[in-house]
Image: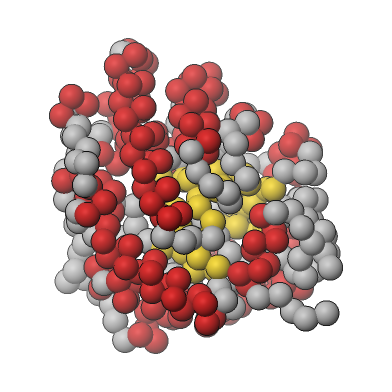
Amino acid sequence: MSKMTPKERIAKLFKKEPVDEMPVFSGQGMVTIQAIEKMGIRFAEVHSSAQYLADSAITSAEIFGFDAMIIPYDLCTVPESLGRGVSLYVDSDEILYPTVPEKWNRIEDVRIPEDFLNHGRMPIVDEAFRILKSESEKKQFAIGGHVLGPLTMAGQVFELNLLLKGLKKDKERFAAFLTQMTDLVIKVARHYQELGVDYMNIREMGSGTDIISPKMWKSLVQPNLIRVFDSLESPAVLHICGSTDLIVEMMNECGADAISVDHKNTVSETRRKLGNNVLLFGDFDPFATLVKMDVKEVEPVIRKCIDDGVDAVWPGCDIWPDVKRENVEAYVKAVRDYGKRPSPAVGRL
């Protein structure tokens, strides 16, 4: 039997068709400092150049044997395109992600330009996707894209504490604002799909039950996520980090092709709740596992994820770029070796 290409492996996984081995990929950033150093640039430079953005994703995948390349790396491209600005820390030699310097204080002030996809760094990200698409034809890596979910996007453009208070005190007005954010998320996600990504991840990171109650999640978050996934092509993933044990069944009702959780989720129990026909991704702490741990501790972490019932071992958040090379190699090897056996939803050839 010939070995599958990374692109084929991920495509088959999302169709719940047998694969040769578990793919190594993520719906969050996977850029590594090893790739940045090999390119001879600083981390701060990667966010403002389509070529650097694409090359760093390709190089990270090539160095470590990832199955996919995913961009962008920061969460500010959309808020920036709406006129909120961006702090890029261009003079820093350290690993500092871009941040949004100015948020709206009143939802009445929120404006979404018709042509926001042409503003800020959005065209740079588009060009980077085109480069990845071209390179993917030769290298056969899958291409991933991501965008924040409606509630989390709202927290990027409007002060989160004011948003959460408003949702409790003035539900109707703030629910309308979340509808506006949902329209925005759909437009960005569909745009990335039109550019040719192989899978799309919706990151509703700010909606775990350590932030909002399950009751509020059901009434204000779930309906918007259902509308998002109804509007997207497959495959599309719903990722929520933080505490999700109490909402995971509602997450599964949103229409995503796969559910992604982080290490705060009790994955073995989630698998029991959802059954074996649902694609479940997770659930290790990337900073603890790939940056802090001794290399000998990595394999047991990855094996536990697989033993608990995931169909793909996903980090619970972006990989922190300054990883230990040996730890990432151990992570990839453990997924390849231990992931040769069938997972609950995906068989093996």
Q: Position of residue 235 (x, y in %)?
A: 58, 51
Q: Nearer the viewer, residue 260 or 33?
A: 260
Screen quadrant of the N terminus: bottom right
Q: Residue furthest front?
A: 194
- Give percent across and percent down for residue 214: 55, 23
47 w.r.t. 28: above or below = below
Question: From where the camera sits, is residue 33 visible?
Answer: no
Residue 220: name its quadrant: top left
Q: In the image, 88: left or right of 2?
A: left
Q: Residue at x 74, y 62 (%)?
A: 303
Q: Residue at x 18, y 24 (%)?
A: 108
Q: What colour-coding does the image apply? A: secondary structure
Q: Residue at x 53, y 19 (%)?
A: 215
Is 217 in front, or is 308?
217
Q: Compared to 325, does 227 lie above or below?
A: above
**Rendered location of residue 313, percent (x, y):** 65, 59
Residue 328 occupies quadrant? bottom right
- Can residue 37 be seen in this snapshot? yes
Q: Residue at x 50, y 65 (%)?
A: 143
Q: Decide which of 330, 63 is in the foreground and name it.
A: 63
What is the count of numbered marks?
Answer: 0
Does residue 231 sit above or below 43 in this rendering?
above
User: Which quadrant holds the C terminus?
Assistant: bottom right
